[in-house]
Amino acid sequence: MPKITVYHKKTCITCKKALAFLDNAKVDYELKDIVQEPPSADVLEKALDENNLMASINKRSTLYKEKNLGKVSLSKANLIKLMIQDPNLIKRPLIIKSGQKTPYQGFEPDTLKAYLQK
């Protein structure tokens, strides 16, 4: 069975829902705290879609609000640097299935189920 890694934050409601979904589906996964063990730049490079960088940003993060990122144009490289500086900026959960080219972010039951079945 492919290895699955889930980057999460204990206080994240969306993460809790995704983990409950995975548990209910009896999916075996490795759990990593996104702040204590953040994803590498390589993982973020694969997660971020050049055409829709905003889809990978946690718009509730302090850094997003402080830097007014909703109104700034950032390159993919600069956004990755910010995410490494403050992993709270990364949309959670970030789910990586070995063998998959692109990680999965957030939680929608149908799309997560489809991602896991690929």
Image: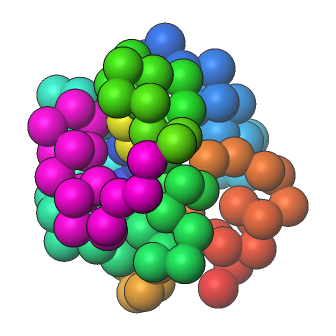
User: Residue 112 lies in what quarter of the image?
Assistant: bottom right
When the figure is inspected, residue 114 is found, relative to residue 44, above or below; the finding is below
On the question of residue 40 being in view, the answer is yes
Q: Is residue 107 left or right of residue 45?
A: right
When the figure is inspected, residue 54 is found, relative to residue 118, above or below; the finding is above
When the figure is inspected, residue 74 is found, relative to residue 67, above or below; the finding is below
Residue 49 on the magenta span: no
When the figure is inspected, residue 4 is found, relative to residue 89, above or below; the finding is below
Q: Is residue 94 left or right of residue 25?
A: left
Residue 100 position, x and y percent, is 46, 84
How is the model colour-coded? rainbow
**What main secondary structure does the magenta stretch of the protein show?**
helix
Residue 14 position, x and y percent, is 65, 30
* Residue at x 64% of width, y 71% of height: 116
* Residue at x 52% of width, y 42% of height: 71
User: Residue 24 lies in what quarter of the image?
Assistant: top right
* Residue at x 76% of width, y 74% of height: 114
Which portion, as a residue range, is magenta?
72-87
Number of dots carrying numbers = 0
Farthest residue, direction right:
110
Residue 103 position, x and y percent, is 46, 69
Q: Is residue 33 left or right of residue 7?
A: left
**Which of 100 and 30 lies nearest the eye of the viewer?**
100
Residue 83 on the magenta span: yes
Residue 75 position, x and y percent, is 31, 67
Farthest residue, direction top:
11
* Residue at x 43% of width, y 47% of height: 72
